[in-house]
Amino acid sequence: MKKVLLGALLLLMLFILPAQTLPEEQAALQTQDARPPVRYWRGGELGVQTLPGLQENPVVPLRSDPKLLVLLYHNIVFGRTGNVYNRDLYNFEHDLEFIKRNFLVTNFTYVLTQGKDADTDLLVITFDDGDLSLYAIVYPLFVQYGLEATIFLVPNFIGQVGYMSWEQVKEMNDYRTENGEKLFYFESHTLTHRMLKELSPEEVREELSRSKALIEAQTGEPVTVLALPFGNGAKDPTIISIAYDLGYQAIRTSIPEAQEVGKIDPWVIKAMNVENYSTDVMVDKSLKLLGR
C-alpha cells in the first residue's frame, strides 16, 4: 500500500513541479520569440516554385475594342480558408499568370489619362483595406514580377493587428524599379470603412477628407481615387459631388463589369471581386465580363 501511495505522490509531483529547461532549449525558445509574427513571402527561400509564365514578359493580344477590367482583392493567405475574402497564394499566382498573358497591368492615372489610346485590354489590380499580407506577400511578389497594384487604405485600420503600419505603407509607396517605375499606389477607402449611403453629407465629407489628408501626409502624393466600402453608394450624386469637391477624380465601385476604355465613367469605375474559388473560375468570370 505504501508503495502505491509513494508512486502516486511522485506522479503528482511531475505535474506540479515546473520543468527544468536546458540552456540550449532556452536559446531556442528565445530565437523563436524573436522571429517575426508574420510569414513573409521569399520565393525560393521558402521552397516556392514560381510559375514559368510569371517570369516571362509575353506580348498581350491586340484588341480593336480594348476594355478595362478592375480586379478587387482583400488579402492573400498561404493556405486555403473558408473566408470568402481570402485569396490563397497558389491560386493568386495562377491569377497573375493569366493576367500577364492577357492584359496590360496599369493604374488608374494611366487609365483615365491615356487609356482611350490603348490597343489591348487594360487591367488594374486593387486591394481593399490594407491587410498586412499586402506587405508580407504582395510586396515582394510584385517586385519580383514587376506588377503594379493599387491599394485602398482605411487610415483607422493602419497599425492595428493584421494591418500594415504607416512605415510599411511608405516603404511600398517609395519603392521604384531599376528603371525608376513606381509599382504601388495608395488611395482612399474612407476613414472608418462605414457604408457611405447610411451617413449624412457632413459625415461623408469627414470620411473622405480626413482619409485623403492622412494618406497624402504619409505618402507625399495626391490621393485621387475613392473605393466605396462594401460598394455602398455607387452612382450616388451626393457622394460623387462631395468627392469631386475634395479633389478626387474617380470612384471605384464593386459592380462586376468590364468597360470599354473609351467609355469609362470615372465616377462609376466597375470592379470584379475575386473570391476564394479556383483560378479556373476567376478566368471564366473575367472572360465573360470582357466578352472574349
Image (spheres, rainbow, N blue to C red):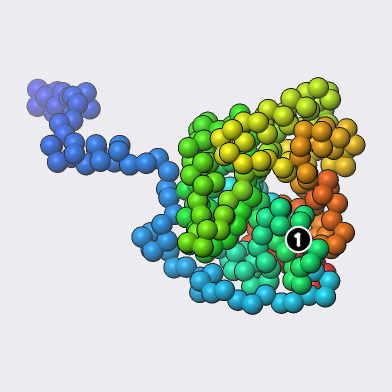
Q: Report how many numbered discs are placed on residues in the image.
A: 1
Q: Position of residue 245 (x, y in %)?
A: 82, 33
In this rendering, position of residue 164 left or right of residue 279: left
Look at 42% across and 48% down and name the residue there. Answer: 39
Q: Nearer the viewer, residue 63 or 164?
A: 63
Which class describes the residues within 10 Å of circle 1: few (<14), some (14-19), or many (20+)? few
Q: Position of residue 174 (x, y in %)?
A: 51, 47
Q: Secondary structure at mark 1?
A: helix
Q: Quadrant of residue 63?
A: bottom right
Above-or-below relation of 173 to 121 = above
Q: Nearer the viewer, residue 218 or 257?
A: 218
Above-or-below relation of 198 to 121 = above
Residue type indicated by callout 1? Gln
Above-or-below relation of 9 to 249 = above
In this rendering, position of residue 148 left or right of residue 257: left
Question: Mark 1 = which residue?
Answer: 114
